[in-house]
Image (spheres, rainbow, N blue to C red):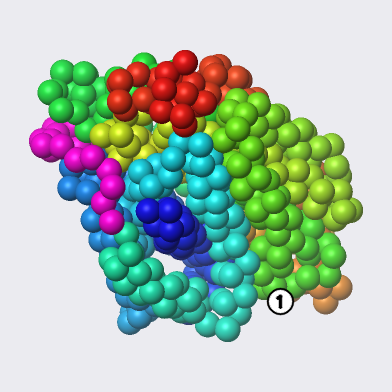
Amino acid sequence: MRSYKWVALSNTTLGMLLAMVNSSIVIISLPAIFRGIHLNPLEAGNVSYLLWILMGYMLVAAVLVVTLGRLGDMFGRVRIYNAGFAVFTVGTILLALDPFQGGGGAMWLIAWRLVQGVGGAMLMANSSAILTDAFPAGQRGLAMGTNQVAGIAGQFLGLVLGGLLSQVDWRLTFFVSAPLGVIGTVWSYKSLRELGSRGQIKIDWLGNISFAVGLTALLAGITYGIQPYGGHSQGWTNPWVLTGLIGGTLTLIAFCVIEIRVEQPMFHLSLFKIRAFAAGNAASLFTAISRGGMQFMLIIWLQGIWLPLHGYNYEETPLWAGIYLLPLTVGFLVAGPLSGHLSDRHGARAFASGGMVLCGLGLLGLLLIPTNFGYVWFGALIFLIGAGSGLFLAPNSAAVMNSVPADKRGAASGMAATFMNAGMVLSIGVFFSLMVAGLSSTLPHTLTSGLTQHGVPSGVAQQLGALPPVGTLFAAFLGYNPIQSMLAPTGVLTHLSPANAHTLTGRSYFPQLLSGPFHHGLVIVFSLAILMSLAAALASVLRGRHFVHDDAHGTAAPLAAAVSGRES
């Protein structure tokens, strides 16, 4: 039994690492993927392909983790987890074998990314519950720290791997996970065993369906709200977006009513009566909103401004953005396991709250440095943000799982993963929208006047200045030269003087042009991220003392009592 807990930790850590690496590996490799299937993602109508390849995985995971955690309570957490490894591996292999080009190739990738997301959700929904079953209460912080920090660090490692592997062949970004997926599948089937309690539970079909429909509609509405519509820079007035947002919200309200009245609910709303569970999940949601959007803004900052200004070609920026973000990952890896171990002794509140305060300070520091910063300061600040997130994550996860009864750990694990994944998808929509809103007030005039000064006819310059800023953001995000991408279809470049053409399409013109409007948008975006970090810190303060659910008596007990087997 003593050795089994380490087997469970190592296997679930591998599962979480793979699941989270693949949630981010396509971010950096998207330019190579679209070149490989011969599709220009910036052309009209192709932005949807880009968004679904990017966000479909996270959306499916957010929708399914609660259901899959509940199924783990019913049929065995290890059984669902093992199946997740197999589904994930099959999806990964088929992604790499995409036989189509153009739109067909994109649809193949979207479909199998969704399948891969199902497997990832099965892993995420049950890994925390398996660890909670295997480890005694006094060691769960260390276990959760190793597991969860590996998962979150995997998000950032995916950025580097995607950049490196896509330089060779875009298919390698998927093939790289296949051998580990096969090994993990075989290993989990042979080594993991059921320790958790299972009961005769009925499937809450009405709850499952209403939750899936409501959350899918809501998150899909947010995803499409980023895209331009009807002459507007964003799509929030699109009837389909409004239908998704309003209909999804109403369906989720109906879902809550159903869960209160059904005999055996899928989503145990009664768990929110446990203060540690409610506060921990609220903190996790605020943290995910802050972290998810921040990651994309840092990538755009590096790829669209800083790296070109420092001599990197646009095509190289996705790879180097991943490399220059490594201090963020190092901060996670240093702080996560340490805080998990210490929180086993001293409780989660101080570490979780302090970690999110550090994140807020790091984000404030990013607002104070210039857009063309010195890297030492930037690296130190993102290390601080990574360390703060690592300090928060492990203690918070352990505190949430410690607070629930053994027979509800699968559902609780799924609920916790839902808050994190939904927060990530929500943050992308919110942060992009705020950044686009910030750019819309300054970029059109700046771009129009800048192009006119370098010989572009005023009519063309005004037309390009009126284009939705989201196209400019996506161009920078994908490693395209934004000005060249905008001017090439107009044919203007061939009529400009060589000096003007070279200036406009060079590495410094667009970053200098974008710096002012981007920083204006960054103030709005990072101000929200700071508020979310402080809200997470406050929620962590309100979680109360370090309690562990006492399954023998059906009550919560202080940690020392739970470890010794007696109530205090």
Residue 103 position within the rendered picture, expressed as x and y whole percent measured from the top left:
36, 70
Nearest to the observer: residue 26 or residue 79: 79
Residue drawn where x is 47% and y is 15% of the image: 568
Q: Where is 480 relative to 550, above or below?
A: below
Residue drawn where x is 51% and y is 37% of the image: 138
Can residue 531 be seen here? The reply is no
Kind of residue sitting beneath label 1: Thr
Q: Residues within 10 Å of mark 1 (few under 14, many from 20)?
A: few
Nearest to the observer: residue 500 or residue 39: 39
Can residue 186 be seen here? The reply is yes
Say whether residue 22 is left or right of residue 107: right
Say whether residue 250 is left or right of residue 416: left
Residue drawn where x is 35% and y is 43% of the image: 133
Residue 349 position within the rendered picture, expressed as x and y whole percent measured from the top left:
60, 25
User: Mark 1 falls on what kind of element?
Assistant: helix
Residue 162 position within the rendered picture, expressed as x and y whole percent measured from the top left:
56, 69
Residue 179 position within the rendered picture, expressed as x and y whole percent measured from the top left:
42, 78
Q: Where is 170 relative to 389, above or below?
A: below
* The magenta stretch spans residue 197: yes
Which residue position is annotated with label 1? 494
Q: Which residues are magenta?
A: 193-216
Q: Where is 224 relative to 567, above or below?
A: below
